[in-house]
Amino acid sequence: MKDSDRYAKIVAWSEEDGCYVGRAPGLIYGGCHGDDERRVFDELCEIVDEVIASMKADGEALPPPTVGKLHELVEALDAAQ
């Protein structure tokens, strides 16, 4: 498993921006955007890998993983329905 697999990557359509927006909450504050959902996801994955490599090169600790937290949120939402 790569370190980047531990972070949720979200790509969603934004009505406000008129395009797909990719984010990795808890890891990066920016993101990426574009008209093709798959390309935005691929770019987001590259950005996440680059951020992690940069943090490691600088001796910075990685933030806590977000994948488990996202799974817990989805389960809680499903249970509430």
Image (cartoon, rainbow, N blue to C red):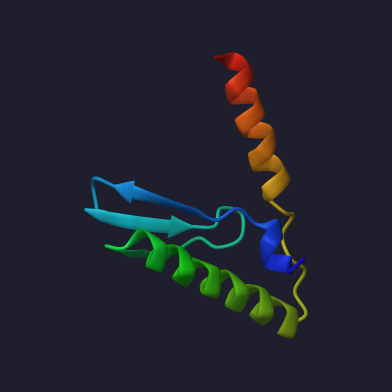
Residue at 61% of width from left, 60% of height from top?
27
For the N terminus, give its image quadrant.
bottom right
Q: In the rendered image of this protein, does residue 58 appear above or below residue 12?
A: below
Residue at 50% of width from left, 60% of height from top?
29
For this view, does 15 lie left or right of residue 28?
A: left
Residue at 61% of width from left, 54% of height from top?
26
Residue positioned most to the top = 81
Q: In the rendered image of this protein, does residue 77 appear above or below residue 62?
A: above
Residue positioned most to the bottom = 57
Q: How many marks?
A: 0
For this view, does 33 lie left or right of residue 64?
A: left
Tell me the quarter of the picture where residue 4 sits: bottom right
Residue 58 visible? The answer is no
Q: Percent x, y for residue 32?
A: 40, 66
Q: In this rendered view, identify the residue nearer to me: 52 or 19.
A: 19
Q: Percent x, y for residue 31?
A: 44, 63
Q: Percent x, y for residue 68?
A: 72, 44
For the C terminus, give its image quadrant.
top right
Q: In the rendered image of this protein, does residue 9 appear above or below residue 56?
A: above
Residue positioned most to the front = 38
Q: Percent x, y for residue 63?
A: 71, 60
Residue 74 visible? The answer is yes
Residue at 58% of width from left, 69% of height from top?
48
For this view, does 72 lie left or right of residue 37?
A: right
For this view, does 31 lie left or right of residue 9?
A: left
